[in-house]
């Protein structure tokens, strides 16, 4: 018998990192790549968004202005300097367009040590 996931959203893989993928805990990750990607919204409209991929992961974390502010506070305003740096990401909730939604935040502290290779975000990346 196949074991069911702990959340229904985990039944539907995404190429983008979601709060549910963090399994209710913090993760120390290392920034490997930052690129602008063409995202298609639920309304079908295209928009370019900056995305980060972490060492050892296949999925992209779509950055928002809050993440940019935290990263610039940790490692300076030049995003080129963020590559190779470790951060702590965690799931939480925030208000967006009048609704409370799940989101991913970056902790405003530099982690001790680098990304934890034993604590992969995704089973397929192990």
Image: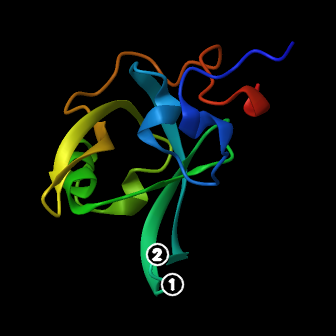
Figure quadrant of residue 97:
bottom left
Image coordinates for residue 113, horizontal then vertical, percent = 44, 17
Question: Can residue 93 be seen here?
Answer: yes
> What residue lies at 32% left-to-right and 41% top-to-bottom?
102
Please identify the quadrant where the N terminus is shown: top right
- Residue 67's tag is none
Q: Residues within 10 Å of mark 2 (few under 14, many from 20)?
A: few
Label 1: element kind: loop
Please identify the quadrant where the C terminus is shown: top right
Question: Can residue 73 be seen here?
Answer: no
Please tell me which residue lies in front, 92 or 48.
Answer: 92
Q: Is residue 106 left or right of residue 16?
A: left
> What residue lies at 29% left-to-right and 40% top-to-bottom?
105
Q: Is residue 82 left or right of residue 36?
A: left
The residue beneath circle 2 is: 41
Image coordinates for residue 57, horizontal then vertical, percent = 65, 40
Image coordinates for residue 90, horizontal then vertical, percent = 35, 29
What's the colour scheme? Answer: rainbow
Tell me how far mark 2 sits from mark 1, CA to CA: 5 Å
- CB of mark 2 within 8 Å of CB of mark 1? yes
Q: Is residue 42 above or below residue 70?
A: below
Please tell me which residue lies in front, 97 or 81.
Answer: 97
The residue beneath circle 1 is: 44
Q: Residues within 10 Å of mark 1 (few under 14, many from 20)?
A: few
Q: Residue furthest bottom?
A: 45
> What residue lies at 36% left-to-right and 16% top-to-bottom?
112
Q: Is residue 101 left or right of residue 23?
A: left
Please tell me which residue lies in front, 44 or 83.
Answer: 44
Label 2: element kind: loop
């Amino acid at each position: 018998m196949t074991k069911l996931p702990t959340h229904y959203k985990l039944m539907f893989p995404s190429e983008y990192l979601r709060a549910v993928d963090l399994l209710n805990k913090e993760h120390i990750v290392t920034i490997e790549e930052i690129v602008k990607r063409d995202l298609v919204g639920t309304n079908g409209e295209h928009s370019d968004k900056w995305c980060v991929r972490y060492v050892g992961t296949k999925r992209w974390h779509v950055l928002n202005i809050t993440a940019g502010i935290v990263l610039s506070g940790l490692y300076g305003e030049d995003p080129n300097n963020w590559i190779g740096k470790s951060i702590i990401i965690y799931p939480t909730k925030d208000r967006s367009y009048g609704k409370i939604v799940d989101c991913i935040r970056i902790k405003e502290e530099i982690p001790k040590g680098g990304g934890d290779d034993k604590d992969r975000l995704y089973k397929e990346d192990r």
